[in-house]
């Protein structure tokens, strides 16, 4: 799947909130990752058919598709892709969502937690 020509990890951010997408995209671009920001699971599925991806940062509560359904379908079709759940709903932290994802980070926590989760998940790929 994976890395671009320069060896940068390819990360897709899927969140229906454009402010979150922009913030996370900027933060991870500054760390040298190749980032694609998408607004929905439908956009994600289309993107995966066209491009290689190393890691997905996925919001759970979005229109159209349930987060657990998205995680399950991605893991079934692309088991090598790592998934970091990034949500503002802390009731999901110890749920099936967090168990199916590779990492779980609550929105609003220190930005370093998301960066650390991304780095750890990418290390698992090797």
Image (spheres, grey):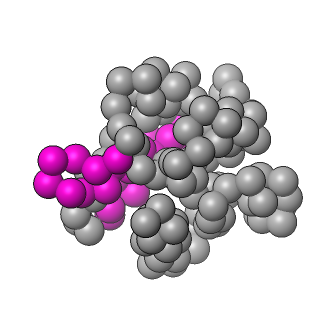
Q: Residue at x 85, y 58 (%)?
A: 95
Q: Residue at x 84, y 54 (%)?
A: 96
Q: Residue at x 72, y 39 (%)?
A: 72
Total numbered badges shown on the rendered structure: 0
Q: Quadrant of the N terminus?
A: top left
Q: In which quarter of the image is the C terminus?
A: bottom left
Q: Which residue is at the front of the view, 25 or 8?
A: 8
For the record, the magenta segment spans 2-29
Q: In which quarter of the image is residue 75?
A: top right
- Res. 111 visible in picture: no
Q: Where residue 94 appears, x then y in whole percent?
A: 83, 66
| Residue 21 lies in the magenta stretch | yes
80 horizontally vs 12: left or right: right
Q: Where residue 16 appears, x then y in whole percent?
A: 54, 36
Question: Residue lying furthest left in this view?
Answer: 6
Q: Where residue 50 appears, x then y in whole percent?
A: 36, 24
| Relative height, residue 72 to residue 31 (above, below) | above
| Residue 110 lies in the magenta stretch | no
Question: Residue lying furthest front in this view?
Answer: 126
């Amino acid at each position: 799947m994976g890395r671009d020509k320069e060896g940068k990890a390819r990360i897709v951010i899927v969140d229906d909130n454009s402010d979150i997408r922009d913030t996370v995209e900027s933060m991870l671009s500054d760390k040298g990752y190749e980032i694609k920001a998408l607004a929905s699971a439908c956009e994600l599925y289309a993107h995966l058919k066209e491009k290689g991806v190393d890691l997905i940062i996925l919001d759970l509560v979005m229109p159209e598709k349930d987060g657990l359904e998205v995680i399950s379908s991605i893991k079934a079709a692309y088991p090598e892709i790592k998934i970091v759940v990034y949500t503002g709903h802390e009731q999901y932290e110890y749920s099936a969502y967090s168990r199916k994802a590779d990492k779980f980070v609550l929105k609003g926590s220190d930005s370093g937690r998301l960066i650390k989760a991304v780095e750890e998940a990418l290390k698992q790929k090797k």
